Image (cartoon, rainbow, N blue to C red):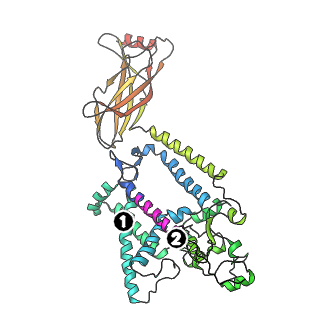
Amino acid sequence: MATNEKPIAKETKTSWRMMRYVAYAIATIIAISIPWITVDGNHLFLLSFDKLKLHLAFVQFDMQEMYLMPFLLMIMFLGVFGMTVMGGRVFCGWVCPQTVFRVIYRDLIETKILGLRKRIKNKQQEPDMSKAENKVKKVVAIIMWTVLATLAAADFMWFFVPPEDFFLYMQNPTEHMVVLGFLAGVVLFLVYDIIFLKENFCVYVCPYSRIQSVLYDDDTVMAIYNPHRGGDIYNENKEKEFTKQKDLLAVNPSAECTACESCVTVCPTHIDIRKGLQLECINCLECVDACTDVMGKLGKESLVVWSSEHEIYNHGKTKYFRPKIIGYGVILVILAVIVGIMGSKKEHMLLNVNKETRLYSIAKSDNGKYDVKNSYIFLLQNTQDKPYKFYFEVIPPKGMEGKIKIEQPTEPFTVQPDVKKKKIVTLHTTDELVDDLTKDTVIPITIKAYALDSNGKIVDKIVVFRQATFTYPREDMLKKETEGK
């Protein structure tokens, strides 16, 4: 029996666009906040080019301690790769600064604020620049974005030049032309990229789109069109066969696609999701929202969903925790543990101990005993941000306690921040440590170096130990010295 009842519109439960806006806001707040977060003068993250320092989790590392950087880079790249295997180019659509900046410029400045574009959902139709009014709006849009680009460029620079130094440098820009030049270069790039290059950066410049095709598998979650319900719009050669619904229905009466092409007009990278997997797709899910709105008015589920090929084509359940994903997770955990262990062993002063070429010297002490001396070259660097007084102690093997002493230096000395200081250190003994007629004896010792604060107390974290040796001469060398005297 025929019926004239209209389809009941389905309620749209979520808006991926609004969820993305929240993600953009969170990412922006994090990016702006990180350079300002400090504890005792140490930043949460800072790779200082001018001071050659790495600040990580409020711990300061010198350039000699940059062994952490390879592990941090591996964590970053493997994290992005694992994210891609799990959710496609979700990084591009939800976190990437290029996407965030384009949304700010196109959707906020051009569309919402200036009305240069008519609708956010139509990203294919460019503004009509033949109108004088639109030309003025375009200039205003460029000026507004240039101001925001300057802020974004400054925030980028703060990860390499801390804000407290950056603003001091900008008070005398002619004395810091390198910093000013980098800032200007980043601003110019952002203006050209966001206003003129646009999504072509994602399509042609960014190498990530080429890498993703290697990482995808049947369970990778992405924006995907369901041809079983909607019908095949493209043939096997990726050629478009249908542009009108009536032509599609003539071939496939059960096809649900209305050929409205809302999913096409809303796409920022100008692709047709119905064509299948394409490198240009950034998983922004704009097409999912568009199809959800259209099909919802017809009382049907969206033909474009965030799902996997396995679920769409094989009608199975997406395997989120598959061996590949677990492998990425295990590797990331191992790398994080390694970074944590290595970072926890951070030394707050740098010390190299090198023995002089002469093994020892022998002299007679005032009480007639042999005075055996070994000399060393200590190269010390204060990696802190304020001066400290440093001193050394020698720890001999068990049974020789107190028998090997420091002859010089006898008083603590001050080392300025980031200054490398060379000190000649002499150890000596007047005790008979070894009675050997055949050879010199190499005695293992430990050098303890530490810092003293303004009150003369040891600073707990600035204590290091270095292994060294003390050479004690054979007996005939001592006798020669006795005969010589």
Residue at (66, 85) in percent of width and height? 244
Does residue 266 lie above or below 341 as drawn?
below
Residue bearing mark 1: 151
Q: Quadrant of the C terminus?
A: top left
Amino acid beneath label 1: Leu
Mark 2 lies on a secondary structure that is helix
Residue bearing mark 2: 201
Residue 5, position in %: x, y?
A: 63, 81
Cα–Cα span, label 1 and label 2: 21 Å
Of marks 1 and 2, the one in the foreground: 1
- Residue extending furthest left? 455
- Toward the viewer: 477 or 263? 263
Amino acid beneath label 2: Phe
Mark 1 and mark 2 residues within 8 Å of each other at the beta carbon: no
Q: Is residue 195 visible?
A: yes
Does residue 155 lie above or below 460 as drawn?
below
Magenta-tinted stretch: 1-29
Mark closer to the chain start, 1 or 2: 1
Quarter of the image for residue 284 reads bottom right
Mark 1 lies on a secondary structure that is helix
Residue at (32, 58) in percent of width and height? 166
**Mark 1: few/some/many CA within 10 Å (<14, 14-19, 20+):** some
